[in-house]
Image (cartoon, rainbow, N blue to C red):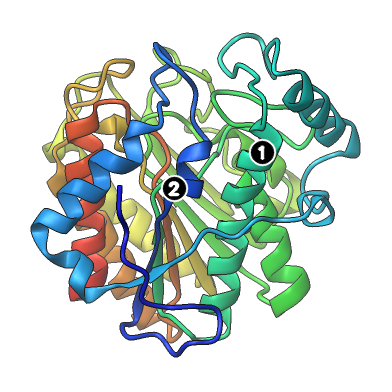
Amino acid sequence: MNHPTRVSATCAPLYSVGLYVGEALKRYAFGDPHPFGPDRLDAFWNCLSASGLDQRLTLLKPVSADLGEVERFHTIEHIERVRTLSRNGKGCLDAGDTPAFRGILEAGLLVVGSTLDACRRIARCEFRRIFIPIAGLHHARRGAAAGFCAFNDIGVAIEALRAEHSVSRIGYVDIDAHHGDGVYYGFEDDPDVLVADLHEDGRFLYPGSGLAHEVGRGRARGSKLNIEMPPGAGDAEFMTEWPRVEAFLRNTRPEFLIFQCGADSIAGDPITHLRYTPAAHRHAAASLCRIADELGHGKLLALGGGGYNRTNLALAWTEVVRAMVES
């Protein structure tokens, strides 16, 4: 995969939408027959470049986080466990979904670091929108890996935005088929992290959470929105429910938007049961761009998340980029 390089850390961007690509991001992947393989990035890039949209983007290099940054969300004990298993390259980081391999620590730090770098660039108004295909690892808890996710780059990013950039209210929108439990429970009692998560009903799909009555806890009650979609739900059902997400964001008025646009909600994914088309992802991305502009800041970071049918993820993520470019 040959990605042209158009920007360095010191160059002014050519376009207002950035994209993180490069061989380094492929390091966060698991071997055959694991569904989260290294070819996911190539599938997306081939589709994107065939569309010509790559010529309207500023391409950015992956960046590695340091362990101190990861500690903003994760416990030291969890980080040390990942470090040990990364060195040994044996065993699993969780109950069996997330196998260890030599270098998984460094690969995870590249995902976290790229997400952090994107947040900083958007917060400093270098870009209005950025997309990172291999990112959005929304299952990892503060103290544990889960569901293909060694670290939760979203959780780290939320903490960093508040600590480094004084962003008080952060909106997180997730349309991955799986509930973003690591983000939800990581901030369940935080009223300033505004979560809208539209996912397959947890009675039928991992991680079995994200029920409609989960709306935040204590003083954060009402700051979270979980929408359960029945297995087999398609674009019509998505379009029916999506206005609830828009109303939630307009009411809560976040100062920065993070969008996890997992493509495992597209029809034909091997491990889920929703039946959206890429049009749903384009609609969601265009809507979030519009809302970000209405709120006066225009700040949107989109993260690829899940998706295990290569054609699906390539098309869905390309449509997300298209919406960001054309907004």
Labelled disc at residue 23: 2
- Where in the figure is residue 266, as x and y percent of width and height? 21, 32
Labelled disc at residue 151: 1
Secondary element at tag 1: loop
Total numbered labels:
2
Q: Nearer the viewer, residue 105 or 289?
A: 105
- Where in the figure is residue 177, as x and y percent of width and height? 36, 30
- Where in the figure is residue 273, as x and y percent of width and height? 26, 18
The residue positioned farthest toward the right in the image shown: 77
Tag 1 and tag 2, C-beta contact below 8 Å: no
- Where in the figure is residue 113, as x and y percent of width and height? 63, 57
- The three-letter amino acid code for the residue at tag 2 is Glu
Answer with the quarter of the image where residue 82 lies.
top right
Q: Nearer the viewer, residue 119 or 84?
A: 84
Q: Is residue 61 visible?
A: yes
Secondary element at tag 2: helix
Answer above or below: position of 175 versus 55.
Answer: above
Labelled disc at residue 299: none
Answer with the quarter of the image where residue 163 lies.
bottom right
In primary-sequence order, the first of circles 1 and 2 is 2
Q: Is residue 135 visible?
A: no
Distance CA(mark 1)–CA(mark 2): 19 Å
User: Is residue 276 found left or right of 248 in the rendered image?
Assistant: left
User: Which residue is drawn at the image coordinates 45% and 20% (left, top)?
Assistant: 202
User: Which residue is drawn at the image coordinates 40% and 34% (left, top)?
Assistant: 306
User: Is residue 265 found left or right of 245 in the rendered image?
Assistant: left
User: Is residue 257 found left or right of 94 in the rendered image?
Assistant: left
Q: Mark 1 or mark 2: which is in front?
A: 2
Q: Quadrant of the C terminus?
A: bottom left
